[in-house]
Image (cartoon, rainbow, N blue to C red):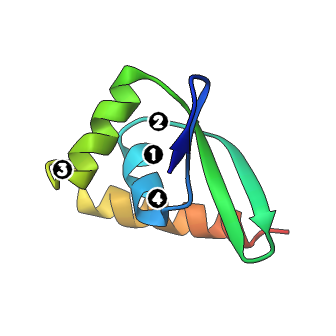
Amino acid sequence: MNQNNKDFRTADLALTAALCVSGFVVEELDRVSPQRSVFVFQNGDELLEVVNQYWRRELRVEPQDYFNQLKVIKARLYER
């Protein structure tokens, strides 16, 4: 995870899906290399709180929404 004042960046697919299901939007998909991509979100206090909840295992999301979001993200990763 790397973040600055402007954006929040993560390569963590599970975290990305959790953030999307929680209402945050992937602003950019940065293809760092052919094997690695980084998801970019607009940084903010609300986003950072959700990230902290995720890492503390306190974040709860609807399981089917989460699974469907994983499929959407994977499709976006594999498109050329």
Relative vertical location of residue 9 with respect to residue 74 in this rendering, above or below? above
Q: Residues within 10 Å of mark 1 (few under 14, many from 20)?
A: some
Q: Label 1: state its secondary structure.
A: helix
Q: Which mark is residue 60?
A: 3
Q: Residue 64: which quarter of the image?
A: bottom left
First in sequence: mark 1 or mark 3?
Answer: 1
Q: Label 3: state its secondary structure.
A: loop
Between the residue at mark 1 and the residue at mark 3, the CA separation in whole angstroms equals: 13 Å
Between the residue at mark 1 and the residue at mark 4, the CA separation in whole angstroms equals: 7 Å
First in sequence: mark 3 or mark 2?
Answer: 2
Between the residue at mark 1 and the residue at mark 2, the CA separation in whole angstroms equals: 5 Å
| Circle 2: residue type | Phe
Q: Which mark is residue 69?
A: 4
> Do labels 1 and 2 touch, CB within 8 Å?
yes
Q: Which mark is residue 24?
A: 2
Residue beneath label 1, please? 20
Q: Residues within 10 Å of mark 3 (few under 14, many from 20)?
A: few
Residue 46: where, in percent of width, then height?
A: 34, 25
User: Which residue occupies 41% across, 35% down?
Assistant: 23
Quarter of the image for the C terminus: give it: bottom right
Q: Label 2: state its secondary structure.
A: loop
| Circle 4: residue type | Gln
Q: Which residue is at the far bottom? A: 35
